[in-house]
Every structure is written in C-alpha cells, then in structure tokens.
Image (spheres, rainbow, N blue to C red):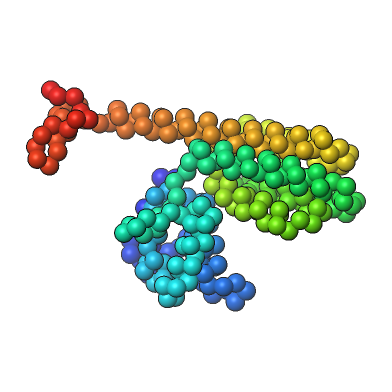
C-alpha cells in the first residue's frame, strides 16, 4: 500500500494510468466513474483518507461536475467514500468495526438465502456452483479472487429467486471487498476459507439445510472476527510506531509558546 496516492490525479497529470476512460456506451457516465474509483480504492491506488477532488476527477474523465457528484454519492452510500462539510470527499478509512459488522449482517442474510435456495437447486445449478467453488479455490490473484468468491456465494443463493435479498447481499459483498483482500496477506486463512467453501458446497449438494445454514453463518462470522482482530492489532502496532518516532528531546508547544498538555515538561 506504500505506492498509494494521497491525491487525485497523480502530480496534476492530465491522465491517471490506473483509471479507465469513461467511454463505455453500456453504462452511465457516473457509474463508469464510480466503478473506476472503486477499483482504485480496492487495489490501494487511492489510499484511505485520500481526497477525491471533483474538479480533478471531472478533468480526467472530460465530463462536467454532475456525473462526478453522482458517482461520489454512490460511493458514499456504499461506504467507499466520506464527505465532510468544507472538506469534500475522501476515501473512507478501513475500520475493524465496519469489517466485523459487514460480516455479521452477511451471516444473517446469507443463512436465510441458502435455506430458501437449497430446495430449488437443480443438477445444472449445482454443477455451476461446483465449478465456481473450484475456480475460487485455485485463484491466486486478489482482484480475481474477490470476484470469484462473490460468484460462488451468489450461485448458492440464486435459485431462491429473491431479488431484493440478492441485492442486499451483493451490496455487502461490494462493501467488504477491501477487507476480503486482506486475507491474501494471511495465506493460512485463505486456505481455511477454501476448505469451508468445500464443506458448505457439500451440505448444499446433500440438500442439508440446517448444516448449510450453520456452516455459512460460522464461515462469515469467523471471517469477520479474523478481520476485526487483524485490523485492531495493525492499528495498535501503527500507533505504537508513531509514539516511538515522536521526538522526546523537546516538548511540543502551542502557537503561543506554551507547553502542550499532551507532552511531559522537561
């Protein structure tokens, strides 16, 4: 993440190599812009806290401010961006609490979805789920794994034919993308997750609804707890490093020259 930019675009350049040009006729301009920004955030090119300046984004895509505002509103509604009065939009920070809550909600919704879907699965839908499970297990690219993981999960729930439920689950998958990528820094847990997928698929193949619901709940809650611990420990380690780098020879002073109450006096 050390190469992540804290601004947009890099160095005031006319173009930014990490974003596509909004020229697709198949989607609205605001959606193309939102997708490009989301990809840059997920991949770490736009770091947490980085400003999302409307004028710079509009220049990059050669559009007016209107679709940019729409794109930023969409990203904010999905949890990717935050907007503050007089400060504009910035990339939302990674949050241990948010990661855990996303997976808690997913566990409830996906347990419901899989219970509804199992009686309606066919031989064809089960074969499709098996294929997606194998593809996710074999995938080593973090970006592709996120997509394959979501495709596998959604294939288990698709026969339920509950579009509103599916939309809520898909939204939570998108909000959890940045967090799921962290598991690639923990190879052992990626392997455990793949094994849990296999066990979950086996329960679906056997049409064992209670076991499938239990397994998907445990799988998602376990992932949420893992990410919560990882992010909490990382935040503590970063805070400790900052404290160690703080100079001790001279106390911090306010603009009036008085010693800061946060620093010990000499």
What quarter of the picture does the C terminus occupy?
Answer: top left
> Measured from the top left, where is residue 8 in percent x and y?
38, 60
At 41% across and 30% down in the image, what residue appears? 236
Q: Observer-nearest residue: 261 or 37?
A: 261
> Measured from the top left, where is residue 222 in percent x and y?
64, 33
Judge whether residue 62 can be spotted in this image: no
At 42% across and 34% down in the image, what residue appears? 235
Q: Observer-nearest residue: 38 or 121?
A: 121
What quarter of the picture does the N terminus occupy?
Answer: top left
Up-down relation of residue 60 to residue 97 (above or below): below
**Image check: 201 left or right of 46?**
right
Q: Quadrant of residue 57?
A: bottom left
Q: Observer-nearest residue: 261 or 59?
A: 261
At 13% across and 31% down in the image, what residue appears? 259
Up-down relation of residue 37 to residue 173 (above or below): below
> Measured from the top left, where is residue 258 in percent x and y?
10, 34
């Amino acid at each position: 993440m050390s190469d992540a930019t804290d601004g947009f675009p890099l160095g005031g350049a006319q173009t930014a190599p990490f974003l596509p040009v909004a020229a697709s006729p198949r989607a609205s301009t605001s959606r193309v812009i939102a997708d490009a920004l989301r990809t840059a955030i997920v991949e770490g090119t736009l770091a947490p806290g980085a400003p999302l300046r409307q004028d710079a984004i509009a220049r990059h895509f050669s559009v007016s401010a209107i679709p940019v505002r729409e794109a930023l509103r969409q990203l904010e509604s999905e949890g990717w961006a935050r907007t503050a009065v007089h400060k504009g939009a910035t990339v939302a920070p990674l949050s241990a609490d948010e990661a855990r809550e996303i997976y808690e909600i997913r566990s409830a919704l996906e347990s419901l979805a899989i219970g509804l879907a199992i009686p309606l699965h066919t031989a064809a839908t089960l074969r499709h789920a098996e294929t997606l499970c194998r593809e996710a297990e074999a995938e080593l690219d973090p970006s592709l794994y996120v997509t394959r993981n979501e495709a596998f999960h959604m294939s288990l729930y698709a026969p339920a034919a509950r579009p509103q439920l599916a939309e809520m689950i898909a939204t939570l998958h998108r909000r959890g993308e940045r967090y799921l990528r962290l598991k690639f820094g923990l190879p052992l847990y990626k392997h455990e997750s793949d094994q849990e997928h296999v066990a979950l698929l086996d329960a679906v193949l056997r049409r064992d609804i209670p076991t499938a619901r239990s397994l998907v709940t445990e799988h998602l809650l376990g992932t949420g707890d893992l990410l919560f611990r990882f992010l909490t420990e990382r935040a503590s380690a970063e805070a400790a490093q900052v404290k160690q780098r703080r100079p001790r020879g001279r106390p911090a002073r306010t603009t009036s020259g008085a010693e800061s109450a946060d620093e010990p006096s000499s």
